[in-house]
Amino acid sequence: MSEGTYQQLWVSTHQTLQKLLFQEQQLLPESGPDRDQGSFFYKLSSFFLHYLKMMRQLDTIYDQLVHPQKRLLVRRLLEGVTGRILELKEELADLEVPIPKYFSLERVKLFQERETMMEFLEKSWPVDYKATVSVVLSQSEAIIMIQRAERARQGRLRAKFMKEIRRDEEQKQQRVRESKWLESHKDRAALIIQKVWRGYLQRKRTKKERLLEMEFIGMLPPSNETDYLMTIKRVQNGEEQRRHHQKEKEIEYQQALHDIPIRLRDEEGLDMEERMKKQIRQWFIECHDLTGQFPEFPDEEIGGSAAIFSEKTPQQVKKELDLLEEENAKKKGKEKQKEKDNKKETEKKKKKEKEKEGSMKGEEEMMMKMAPSKFVPLLAEGHEEFQSVWGKQKVPKYPNQDIDLEKIREQKRKEVEEEIRVQVDNLMRQELESLRMVVDRDLTKIVKAKGKAKAKTGKGKKGQGKDKDLTPNRSLDSLYEELLEEGLIKKCKNVKLSDYIGDYLYLGSALKLGNREPMPSLFDLKQNVILYGVLRLGSAEVHAMAPHVRSILLAGPAGTGKKMLVNAVCTETGANLFDLSPENLEGKYPGKAGLQMMMHIVFKVARLLQPSVIWIGNAEKTFYKKVPREEKEMDPKRIKKDLAKALRFLHPGDRVMLIGTSDQPQLADIRNLCKTYERILMVPQPDYGTRYLIWNHLIDQYGKSLLSHGDISGLTKISDGYTPGDITLAVQLVMTEKRKIQLIRKPLKPYEFLEILAKLDPVYEEEEASLKDWYFRTPLGRRNLKAAEDQAEAEAIRLAKEKKK
């Protein structure tokens, strides 16, 4: 795709955005609530779909657009759309959500620096010689061991030597036989060669026809896959070249942002300074002629001399100052009367509200409202900027990607003027005081002004108290190294969320019609992890404005990929991984003071190196109802109170998230567990579609031809009850290096996997049922169950009304 194509895609995206912004106004609280619940959710779902499509388009545009000034606006719009999707998710939604590419592409250097630092620190640690095992042998045992090794070495050399001798003799005999046979049977040899060649051609033709037939009926991938892969590779190379061009233009843009202000100061700085001084002096003279005294110089909070240059005459300025003084005096007297009036009005309103509560309560429950959005104004602002700056330009086929230096000059000229204005204001304040001393002899005003300034500075010094820092004299590097040595910071595995395989639950609507609440699929789980974890941690702007989520709990059977999801979140967002699992904390930072110090260091480093993920494996152990005897020494509940306190200090903008994983959440105190973890995501068993995709993906790694020989559908049915971890382990145990070599002459059979699966324990129905019962006792589960029951009742009422008609 050319640059013009991406420009046209950007224009079409803004056309869609303009329609959406217009439709957003109809769902605001001011426009009135929607009485029909179905139509309200239909509108929300349509908005969700449109914003998802727009997010993909803006992600592609930002990834491939070269012009740096345009990319800044596209980045703001992409973050705004991402935040709007998260807001709509709070109201609705279970659809596929993409991950913006810049989450990982723009943090490649950070990942590499972090890995090199962790490797360097691990190598610099002293070796623990106590861990090494030393074996002491007697003299006779050592001699026997050496003799065995030497005999084995000599035997291998002798066998190799004899093998080479036999091979040379066989080659000589073969040459002699061939030479004698060819001399006496030339015609017969020519006939044999023809037969072999014709047989080869026919076999090749037959094989080609068989492959074409298999492709036609859909049993094999298309034969032109190599051409397709070459095309994909060329497209990827073009995208990489465009990204390289982006970096060059970005460096050029940053250099221009640095050089242009310097040039403006050198070329226009003196003229700006002289012009400002002349204007301010002229204002001094006009005000003195009009009022007989020099005016008060505006404070920096108001804007300094910028308030003077608002194209107003001295008379207008004097009137405004007089009006401000009168208004301030009147406000003090009216405040007391307003308080009395407000009390009376509030009492009247309370009485009216109590009277209307009974009649309006039923109607309000049926009326749907949507909360005001924080991101729609950002999108509207970005759209207006596009229309005013870039929308009026025509889109050529090959647009110019050079930086618009004139726009940078306009932007930086204002900044340079503000910097020079601050310096000029300081000089002109001193000049104004000297004029008063010489002309007006007004010393009392100067003393009063100084007293006011001191009072203002005294008020400014008062501030809110900060949290106590237990490590004020330690650097970030030392704290990071300490956590790394203690094993509390770990290197996450390089796993992407696209590697977590899961199919959509196609029977969900059918189950709902049968008054059965379906469990979420692995596809739904992955989308929720993207919405709650990746999109919030990946962007600072989105995290600061989106609905705040501090913690997530992933609950499900062992082997369903919970740890994989945690590593995927860290990989997609570039987050640091902190491990506070009870097993990892055993024997570390003992005592109450040590525990407080550990939690303080972990959350301090997590904030300073955000984004960060704090992972707690076996999260149920932190909230045990009753600690087992064998785990009492480990003290798994030691961080329970400090963890809750530390989470309270996480505010919007602190890209730190607690993610817990649990195989047996039933063992925990459900009340305290749900207080700590705001979102509980169930990791269910894979259904038929998901298991089919997993088998297909795992076997496909060893060759696509194996898929035609194996019965994937049969394996999918038989593996019901097994987790993705069990299926992956079975494939890994079967596909050894020796078995890969034998694939040419010994095709892969399904029973080979069944032998491994038979030795593994599946997830039994009792365990799955207990997890479901536990989930429906959580606040979120009760809410979903109640919503399903209300929907079923509404559907029953609708059907009853239709029957009456």
Image (cartoon, rainbow, N blue to C red):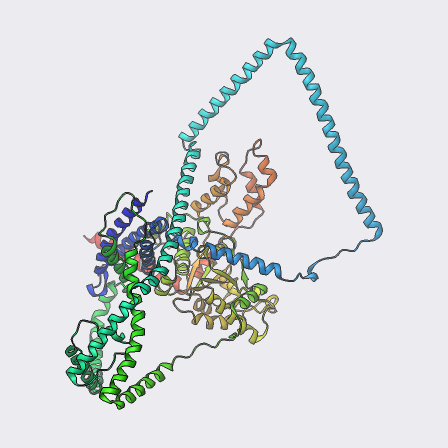
Percent across and percent down for residue 612 are: 47, 62
Front-most of residues 358 and 403 = 403
Front-most of residues 771 and 52 = 52
Percent across and percent down for residue 303 are: 27, 74
Q: Is residue 451 above or below residue 663?
A: below
Is residue 259 rendered to the left or right of residue 480?
left
* Image quarter of residue 302: bottom left
Residue farthest bottom in this picture: 444
Is residue 125 rendered to the left or right of residue 401?
right
Would residue 519 be seen by someone viewing this image from the given angle?
A: no
* Image quarter of residue 332: bottom left
Percent across and percent down for residue 761 are: 55, 50
Q: Is residue 351 above or below residue 712?
A: below
The tally of labels here is: 0
Q: Going 54% across and 36% down the picture, which residue do you hit? A: 749
Would residue 572 be seen by someone viewing this image from the given angle?
A: yes
Q: Going 27% across and 53% down the picture, which residue do you hit? A: 46
Is residue 181 rendered to the left or right of residue 417?
right
Q: Is residue 89 above or below residue 737?
A: below
Percent across and percent down for residue 577 are: 50, 61
Is residue 192 rendered to the left or right of residue 467?
right
Front-most of residues 184 and 256 = 256
State which quarter of the image contains the N terminus.
top left
Front-most of residues 795 and 572 = 572
